[in-house]
Amino acid sequence: MTSSKTLELDTSSSSESHVEKDTSLPSDATFLSEKPLVSLIVPAYNESSIIEANLAILCEYMQSLEANYQWEMIIINDGSRDDTHAKALEFAKSRDNILVLHHRINFGLGQSLKYGFKNCQGDYIVVVDLDLSYSVDHIGDMLDRIVKTQARIVVASPYMRGGSISNVPWLRKTLSIWANRFLSFTDKRSLATLTGMVRVYDARFLKKINLRSKGMDINPEIIHKARLLGARVEEIPAHLCWLPQKANEVKRISSMKIGWQIVDVLLSGFLFRPVIFFLIPSLILFLLSIYANFYAFLRSWSNYKDLASYQQFPDFTEAIAMAYNQSPHTFFIGGVTLILAIQMFSLGTLSMQSKKYFEEIFFLASSIYEKKQNDSSTEN
């Protein structure tokens, strides 16, 4: 296994030339074994109060899996303002299979995960919350499922049948439930949980996906791009339970930035199925137009009958003019909503066409990238 080591990303540039490595690292041949290698990725941000105890719990659990797997742990300190980084280094010092990565400033969950994905060597990549809001037992369950089903991704899902949630603040819980219901709808209800971070990935598959998100929206992005490639995605029932992070803490407080989270969810839903953002408003506007125009027609017909009571062949346009004078706003609403409905429907049609083009280009680019990777491996 590898010796303990540290990588640090210079915040002055995203270029990989600024990554500093310990020159004493052994070669990848150290990891060769008949047992699959599991890379356990643990993002950390201001986790000083829990990091040592929870890392010990994770290590103890991973040791219980050593009959079936090798394992390594990658801790990513994402610009913590406390001594999370120092404690992570101290913890890794006495262990030969732990890698500590460090961002000098807080980049966000997505950037941390991409940094971890790039620097891990496992056959399977497991991502967990350092706060252990999901019990460590989920790791073994997810690994069992991905090995058994040969899926590319397995998600720990508290929102599917058999899953549960405990001790999560009401607002955070409600927003999370509805966010996942919305994303599940845009994903054609194939999964119950799309925002969850606790997952296991087939490493070879994951590393051929070009990920762009820097924040929490990286989790739906991975699912979206896996769908485009036709990958099999499974989920297992999970128990999400928030635990106090400090000795005197009775109830945890959510640090979620609600406004940004809502925006991220809406954007993720748009990526999954952009057409609903146009066709549903189009349908609503069309129904409103029908209502307004039908009301205008009834008023015009009533005026026509009044005119017919003292004219033998009244002009229906005169009846319409009378109706317009009586309620001009009805005609305005009916006309404007009909125009907007047609425009929204047209945009929805264009979005469907654009998504098809994007899927074709993404699939083609991924195929080319995979072929280059295979050719490079063959030459080496």
Image: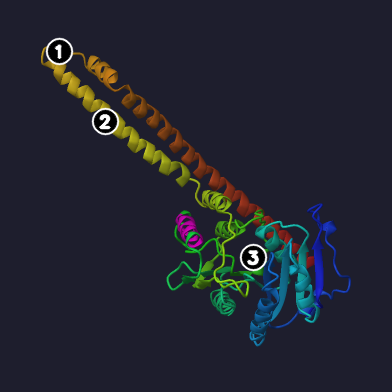
Name the residue type under label 1.
Answer: Phe
Residue with the mark numbered 3:
205
- Residue 315 sits above or below residue 43 on the image: above
**Crowdedness of circle 2 by 10 Å Cα count: few (<14), some, many (20+)?**
some
Residue 246 lies left or right of residue 313; in this view the side is right
Q: Nearer the viewer, residue 249 or 192?
A: 249
Front disc: 3 or 1: 1
Residue 209 visible in the picture: no
Image quadrant of residue 67?
Answer: bottom right
Tell me the residue that label 1 is attached to: 313
* Comparing labels 2 and 3, the label whose residue is closer to the camera: 2
**Residue 26: horizontal and vertical position, in percent?**
84, 76
Tell me if mark 3 has few (under 14), some (14-19) or many (20+) residues whose alpha carbon lies within 10 angstroms of its own: some
Q: Main secondary structure of the magenta part?
A: helix
Identity, as a three-letter code, of the amino acid under mark 3 = Phe
Q: In this view, which residue lies farthest toward the bottom?
A: 67
Label annotation for residue 40: none
Tell me the residue at 47%/44% (across/down): 277
For residue 294, the mark is 2
Three-letter amino acid code at the position of disc 2 = Phe
Over which residues does the magenta segment extend?
172-185
Q: Nearer the viewer, residue 253 or 346?
A: 253
* Residues at discs 2 and 3 in contact (Cβ within 8 Å): no
